[in-house]
């Protein structure tokens, strides 16, 4: 299958599938009040296919682009499937009930939100996966928060803040490895360069969660009756024991030993299954059912039933189908050159380092918004903007931080994005069932949006914005990296992209 000669669409043509898809999404979400973005995104894929035909592509070419991005994301889909198994099995094993039971006993409402953020940060840093953290520890924290009478959106905001920040600076994280890879910098230099935005954002978020805890919650005694009902229901239906925390410990130990995420999570699911068999007295077929279809129980306490009736591979299918459609749409936009045209139009209009840094963060956010894929939102701007940073004499560490923050951290704040869809599903926020108020977790995930904001302030002030070192420039020469000739742009390429001269 021979591809047509490379021809980028005009800006109006490139914007057509993006704008129309956003219109259809708006109609579905806000006019029909129906939070199922699947069909609007599928329509967007079809519109992009028509744009491809207009540019000389065949449907097979567009399909190839869509399937390529889906293929790249399959490890994340595998994590989703494994997390679905863990949710069902860890509830049946008593692991999640034990976490909730002891959490209600040890934590206080005033410190709960701050503790939830810190705990998720540590677990995510250890596991290297925000999704695994949200789907396991995050679920237990939702139960504890409910026991303290804390609104679900506050707890979800704290969980998301911690989980995605831990993922952002974990050397085990796929996105943390992807950002330096596409921008040509060292992994640990990339992590160190994110600390000036990560630490202040986390500190501010921690202070807000502490303030909210002391001003919006009552002492634990005020919730004594609710806590007693929850713990009573848990003890009536499960064996509660510290030994049932071993599956969690196993996953963390395997992550610390740098085992891959999927085998680590699967080992946790297997350990939970054994606990369900030998501690809770479940049958083997029951465990298989919990792993596939989720756990079901009627305790007589509606709050407990809402928390525990979930999990299983099938519970992830709504999210997986949304992710696959969104990724296909993003891949088609990339294949047809629509995203590249839009990015080039932005790049022609920005001047100075602060403008380029703002454009890089904004492009990653916009790609997240339109394409629904955190990987594409890191990879595409990373590839497109790197020559501009080199041409300006700035280290591409600035770019790797920009795309990580606009990609990884903004992903969970967009409900139809892969990250946002997973958060809504795993934390049982019930958006598709009409509990739209739980979307307030988006502004309450303070750490996720504060970090890119702080980064943009640094860019304007010239702080923590390293210039390229002589060693970095020499590496560009030796590897033949592309550099933008900003002083003499060639007519056929708006930014005058040229390879760095050989030594």
Image (cartoon, rainbow, N blue to C red):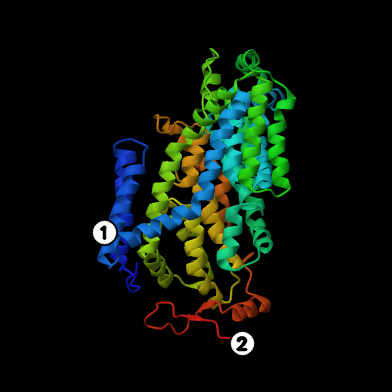
Q: Residue at x 58, y 26 (%)?
A: 287
Decide if residue 210 is in sight here. no
> x and y percent of residue 417 in the render?
45, 47
Decide if residue 5 is in sight here. yes
The residue that label 1 is drawn on is 50
Evaluate if marks 2 and 1 touch, with contact meaning CB atoms under 8 Å apart. Answer: no
Q: Is residue 300 above or below residue 291?
A: above
> x and y percent of residue 211 in the render?
63, 36
Q: Quadrant of residue 345?
A: bottom left
> x and y percent of residue 244 in the render?
70, 26
Q: Quadrant of the N terminus?
A: bottom left
Left or right: where 172 falls relative to 362: right
Q: Quadrant of the C terminus?
A: bottom right
Q: Earlier in the sequence, mark 2 or mark 1?
A: 1
Q: Is residue 250 above or below residue 346?
A: above
> x and y percent of residue 307 in the render?
54, 25
Q: Is residue 454 above or below residue 397?
A: above
Query: How many numbered discs sit on the rendered protein?
Result: 2
Looking at the image, which residue sits at the far bottom? Answer: 503
Q: Residue at x 40, y 29 (%)?
A: 433
Left or right: where 43 falls relative to 419: left
The residue that label 2 is drawn on is 503
| Mark 2 surroundings: few (<14), some (14-19) or many (≥20) residues within 10 A | few
Label 2, secondary structure: give it.
loop
Residue situated in front as seen by the camera: 368 or 234: 234
């Amino acid at each position: 299958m021979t591809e047509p000669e490379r021809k980028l669409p005009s800006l109006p043509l490139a914007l057509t599938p993006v704008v129309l898809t956003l219109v259809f999404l708006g109609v579905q979400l806000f006019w029909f009040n129906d939070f199922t973005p699947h069909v609007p995104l599928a329509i967007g894929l079809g519109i992009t296919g028509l744009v491809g035909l207009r540019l000389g592509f065949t449907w097979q070419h567009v399909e190839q682009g869509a399937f390529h991005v889906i293929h790249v994301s399959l490890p994340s889909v595998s994590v989703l499937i494994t997390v679905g198994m863990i949710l069902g099995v860890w509830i049946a094993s008593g692991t999640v009930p034990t976490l909730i039971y002891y959490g209600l006993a040890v934590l206080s409402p005033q410190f709960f939100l701050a503790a939830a953020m810190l705990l998720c940060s540590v677990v995510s840093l250890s596991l290297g996966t925000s999704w695994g953290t949200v789907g396991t520890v995050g679920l237990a924290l939702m139960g504890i928060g409910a026991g303290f009478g804390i609104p679900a959106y506050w707890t979800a905001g704290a969980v998301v803040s911690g989980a995605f920040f831990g993922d952002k600076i974990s050397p085990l994280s796929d996105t943390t490895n992807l950002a330096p890879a596409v921008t040509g910098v060292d992994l640990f230099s990339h992590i160190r360069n994110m600390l000036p935005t990560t630490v202040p954002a986390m500190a501010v978020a921690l202070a807000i969660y502490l303030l909210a805890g002391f001003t919006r919650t009552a002492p634990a005694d005020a919730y004594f009756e609710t806590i007693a009902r929850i713990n009573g229901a848990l003890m009536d239906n499960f064996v509660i024991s510290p030994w049932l925390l071993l599956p969690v410990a196993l996953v963390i130990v395997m992550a610390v030993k740098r085992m891959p995420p999927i085998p680590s999570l699967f080992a946790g699911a297997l350990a939970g299954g054994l606990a369900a068999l030998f501690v809770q007295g479940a049958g083997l077929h029951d465990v298989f059912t919990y792993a596939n279809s989720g756990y079901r129980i009627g305790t007589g306490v509606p709050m407990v039933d809402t928390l525990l009736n979930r999990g299983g591979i099938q519970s992830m299918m709504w999210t997986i189908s949304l992710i696959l459609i969104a990724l296909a749409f993003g891949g088609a936009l990339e294949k047809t050159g629509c995203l590249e045209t839009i990015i080039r139009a932005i790049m022609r209009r920005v001047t100075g380092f602060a403008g380029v840094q703002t454009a890089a963060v904004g492009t990653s956010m916009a790609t997240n918004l339109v394409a629904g894929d955190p990987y594409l939102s890191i990879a595409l701007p990373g590839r497109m903007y790197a020559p501009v940073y080199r041409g300006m004499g700035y280290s591409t560490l600035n770019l790797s931080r920009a795309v990580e923050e606009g990609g990884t951290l903004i992903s969970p704040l967009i409900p139809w994005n892969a990250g946002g869809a997973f958060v809504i599903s795993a934390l049982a926020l019930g958006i598709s069932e009409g509990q739209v108020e739980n979307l307030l977790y988006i502004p309450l995930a303070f750490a996720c949006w504060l970090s890119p904001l702080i980064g943009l302030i640094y860019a304007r002030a010239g702080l923590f914005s390293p210039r390229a070192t002589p060693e970095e420039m020499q590496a560009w020469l030796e590897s033949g990296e592309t550099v933008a000739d900003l002083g003499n742009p060639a007519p056929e390429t708006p930014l005058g992209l040229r390879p760095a001269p050989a030594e």
